[in-house]
Image (tube, helix red, strand yellow):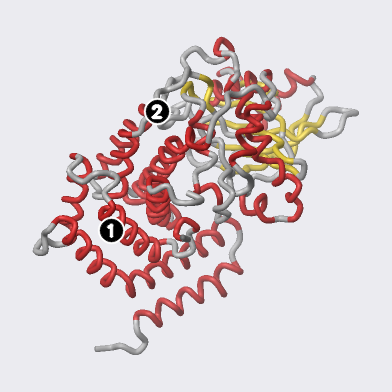
Amino acid sequence: MTALTAPLTRVMQARFGPSAQVVDMTRLSGGASQETWGFGLEVPSEPTRKLILRRAPFQSAAKGEAIGLVKEAHIIAAAARAGTPVPEIIHVCSPEDDLGDAFIMAHVEGQTIARKILRDEEFSHARSRLAFQCGEALAKIHAVAPHSLPSDLPISHGLDQLDRYEAIYRGFEMDRPVFELALAWLRQHAPQPLPTTLVHGDFRNGNLMVNPLGLAAVLDWELAHQGDPREDLGWICVNSWRFGVREKRVGGFGALEDLLAGYQAAGGQAYEAEDLTWFQALGSFKWGIMCLIMYQAFATKADPSIERAMIGRRASEAEIDLLNLIEGRPHA
Amino acid sequence: MHEAPSSEELLGAVIGFLTEKAAPQLSGQAAFHARVAANALALVEREMAQRQPADARARALYAALLNDTSSPLEALTKEVCARIRSGALACDDPALLAALREITSAQLTIDQPTYSGLKP
């Protein structure tokens, strides 16, 4: 029992009848600003359903670029209507539910840990089709009708993000020549923005629920925004998400050709590899700055863990990836 | 001078304790952080061995690039950043790219020596 069980039970009973019971509440993950809970829903004469509660305990002080959980739930529902594999949204909480900024969704069986998905025998069949399926899912995300999205969903194109991350980097007053090089190169090579679509914003290993048949659900929509569809296609190619399997450009599990073929098969635009290089480089730059942001959380004692400190030493990973991209090296 | 045990030996002993004794007896987040702690000390170990030669080499590379053999590494690094930002050093300058690759590779050999991006 937790303090959440009573309000959650009231919500579930309003939805599933007065005999509905919440069982086995378990904290799955999350930091101070956001929590994920798993629980069972018992309704007489039906099998127990596994559900997930996502909540921000205090008023939706959405941090950074995060859009807040209610908006996130509405976007997941819109993506589902467009045919994207996502967890079913069961309930979007309102203030009188007494659960904070929150929503309840179905639990989807599968694995999100990249090292298992990339290496375990159980996922060998999934690996052979995952890049194609990711392409299909992204094409459907990018085809979500604009009128079905929250009207105040932020618009952020590649250069907007470059500006934002450059400002953060400048604020740190660190002299990192490779980040300077990346900034100059990205500014010189910026492509014309494409017409705005829904962008997932964090489509990568860790946010993809995979089962032995392949992609089961796209998770973690908190960075969703309106922007350039190539951003998502480039982000899943960032070497940091390949977890050592560098020769497979898409998430360490697949070929870029398969991603683009799946994208086109599901109605997406036809892109070439070189259309994504700029967005992949933007992704590596953003990840490098994110490493420094996480280190700052340690340096300012906001989060004193060794893990936060050590992540600062991963900025050099993004630097070598940026050099590999800028120099056009194989498997960049 | 007290060199027995050396700093390296002490670090090695603590890393061994964290990975072989502490982590297996811990669970969940604490076990994870014990392993991260051991990784952090292994990084310190590499840095103790490699920082000085890496900095000397970086200084030589930047000195050649900027034609300035008198400034310290920190000032040279700041100047390289300023010249890239102003365009005085071009993004496709082969000497710049070669220097940055060598310096970044040396830094990664300290930070994350098994990172895939280091492979040719």
Q: Is residue B90 visible?
A: yes
The residue at 42%/32% (across/down) is A63
Residue A78: percent from the left, percent from the top? 63, 18
| Parent chain of label 1 | B
Q: Indicate the quadrant containing the N terminus of chain B: top left, top right, bottom left or bottom right.
A: bottom left
Q: Is residue A204 above or below residue A76?
A: below
Left or right for B60, reference B31: left
Residue on which the image places disc 2: A191
Q: Which of B26 and B12 lies nearest the eye of the viewer?
A: B12
Do the residues at discs 1 and 2 belong to one chain? no
Residue at the limit of the structure toward the top, as seen here? A147
Q: Residues within 10 Å of mark 1 (few under 14, many from 20)?
A: some
Q: Is residue A101 above or below residue B88?
A: above
Q: Is residue A4 visible?
A: no
Cα distance, mark 1 to mark 2? Answer: 28 Å
The residue at 61%/69% (across/down) is B24
Amino acid at dot 2: Pro
Left or right for B78, reference A6: left
Q: Which numbered disc covers residue B99?
A: 1
Residue A221: percent from the left, percent from the top? 56, 30
Q: Which of A68 and A321 lies nearest the eye of the viewer?
A: A321
Q: Quadrant of residue B118?
A: bottom left
Residue A12: percent from the left, percent from the top? 72, 24
Secondary element under disc 2, as helix, strand or loop, is loop
Residue A108: percent from the left, percent from the top? 72, 36
Amino acid at dot 1: Ala
